[in-house]
Amino acid sequence: MSDSTPTPRERLAHQLAEAVAEALRSDLARRERALLVVSGGSTPVPFFHALAAMALPWSRIDVTLADERWVAETADDSNARLVREHLLRGAATEARFVPLTSEAATPEEGAAEVGRRIAELSWPASVVILGMGGDGHTASLFPDSRELELALSTDEPVVAVRTPSQPQPRITLSADRLHQAYRHYLHITGEEKRAVLGRALAGDDTRSLPIRAFLASPLSIHWAP
């Protein structure tokens, strides 16, 4: 086997990038601007690289995040840093990136400002790309979060989140805001997450597996081993 042969995850990333690029082109044919909502973590990095290489009118594309840790954008675990380093490169630097943090000390203090910033974007989003953790969370909708019920029910754009299983406070787009999109893609890898998704599809308790909040709507699932 040649060293240049793409892995299944690399093929998946490229296929997802092609689908997202085509969706953005389609929407930009009838709208002045298009909005792309992405998720953080290690899984989307190959997808970011593939999408950044796509020929798109990047200056007409807004990019924001599904959720973020309330840390400086220069922090190693900042999703904004991840996007800037892996997606907003080459021609894609012309995209307008809208982060989910502010100068406020806490997400509770900063949520109103961030919410106004997010509400001004060109909703519905063209694409929302969700990830999923081994506990069934997506965005920062964690099963052990005190704010989960609020995040699932509010019509506010963002929610400040405190989660015992996570070291940093977070901010997340609400489920209502995440639902405001023409297309939803779930991007996951590995057998463990496939098993979690199988359990989610077999039940309806959103509190135990928050990804279920998005399974009743059209959702394109992109998985590789």
Image (cartoon, rainbow, N blue to C red):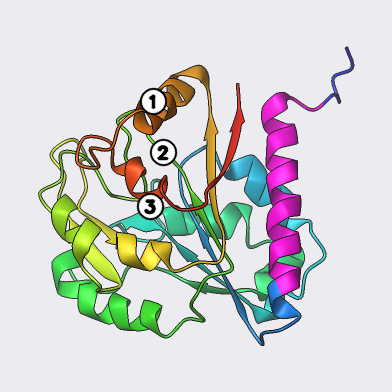
Mark nearer the N terminus (2 vs 1): 2
| Position above or below: 95 against 165 | below
Residue name at image x 14 percent, y 67 percent: 108
* Residue type marked 2: Met
Q: Which mark is residue 127?
A: none
Q: CA distance from mark 3 to mark 1?
A: 30 Å
Residue name at image x 30 percent, y 72 percent: 157
What residue is shown with label 3? 75
Q: Is residue 81 left or right of residue 135?
A: right
Residue name at image x 48 percent, y 78 percent: 123
Residue 8 on image: x %, y %: 71, 26
Q: Determine if the magenta segment contains residue 176.
A: no
Where disc 3 sits, the SS reads loop
Q: CA distance from mark 2 to mark 1?
A: 9 Å
Q: CA distance from mark 2 to mark 3?
A: 22 Å
Q: Residue furthest left?
A: 146
Q: Which mark is residue 196?
A: 1
Residue 221 on image: x %, y %: 56, 40
Q: Are marks 2 and 1 in contact (CB under 8 Å)?
A: yes
What residue is shown with label 2? 132
State which region is magenta: 6-26
Q: Nearer the viewer, mark 2 or mark 3?
A: 2
Quadrant location, the C terminus: top right
Q: Residue furthest right?
A: 2
